[in-house]
Amino acid sequence: MQRRKQFSRNLDTASAPPPTCPRLFWASFKLSAFTFGGGYVIVPLMERQFVEKYRWLEQGEIRNHIAIAQSAPGALAVNAALMAGYSLKGLAGAVSCLAGTVLPPFLIILCVYFLYAQFAANEWVRIALTGMGIGAIAVLIDAVIGLVIGIIREKNLFSGAVLVLAFTGMFAFGVPVWAVLLASIVAGVGWSLLRASKMKN
């Protein structure tokens, strides 16, 4: 209820349609149907859909959803869609986004299962998949640049320090992803508690 009130208060409802369950389902369906490569490929597409096009969420909210979704078990796209739907329409919104996110890959995998034997050795199919892989890399780079620019614009030294240390740990020293995420969570909680104690004093 509070999130819906914030939506109506902050956004111009004349140009931003309210996030009904059918709209959430269709928005998630389109995202899932055209997201190839998995993982962070969905980040820029989700921002364009939920932030720029419909203006249902703010960019900071999307980044928070992505961060929590990455830390939780399961597919990033599914977790992020669940959080976005729940923040907008509660349980019904979460179910709508979940159904819209899961249905396209289910249908595609079902078709591939029946047609794989016929097209597995097809040269045109191989070329198309190679092109899709290259495109997915470009989208991933765009997502990373967008996230970094967002942190720079916030001028938050703590976020910048965590970003640099996490990247250095994984790239230079081969620290596992789970360890980086766990350390980032601990650092974030500690930083928040420190700021809260300073505000009280």
Image (cartoon, helix red, strand yellow):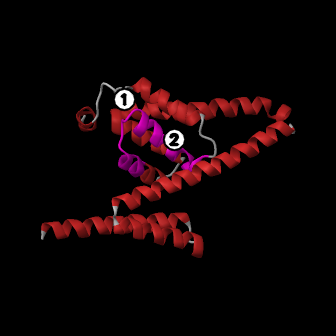
Residue 197 quadrant: bottom left
| Side of 183 relative to 15 (left or right) | right
Query: Residue 184 placed where, x, y %?
Result: 42, 66
Q: Callout 2: few (<14), some (14-19), or many (20+) C-alpha neighbours within 10 Å? A: some
* Residue 100 in view here: yes
Which disc is residue 19 wearing?
A: 1
Q: Are marks 1 and 2 in contact (CB under 8 Å)?
A: no
Magenta run includes residue 55: yes
Q: Amino acid at mark 2?
A: Leu
Magenta run includes residue 27: no
* Residue 120 in view here: no
Q: Secondary structure at mark 1?
A: loop
| Side of 94 relative to 36 (left or right) | left
The residue at 50%/52% (across/down) is 73
User: Compared to 149, does 127 lie above or below?
Assistant: above
Query: Residue 122 placed where, x, y %?
Result: 86, 37
* Residue where numbered disc 2 is placed: 45
Looking at the rendering, the stretch of residues picked out in magenta corresponds to 38-65
**Pick the front one: 98 or 157:** 157
Of mark 1 and mark 2, the one earlier in the sequence is 1
The residue at 38%/67% (across/down) is 186
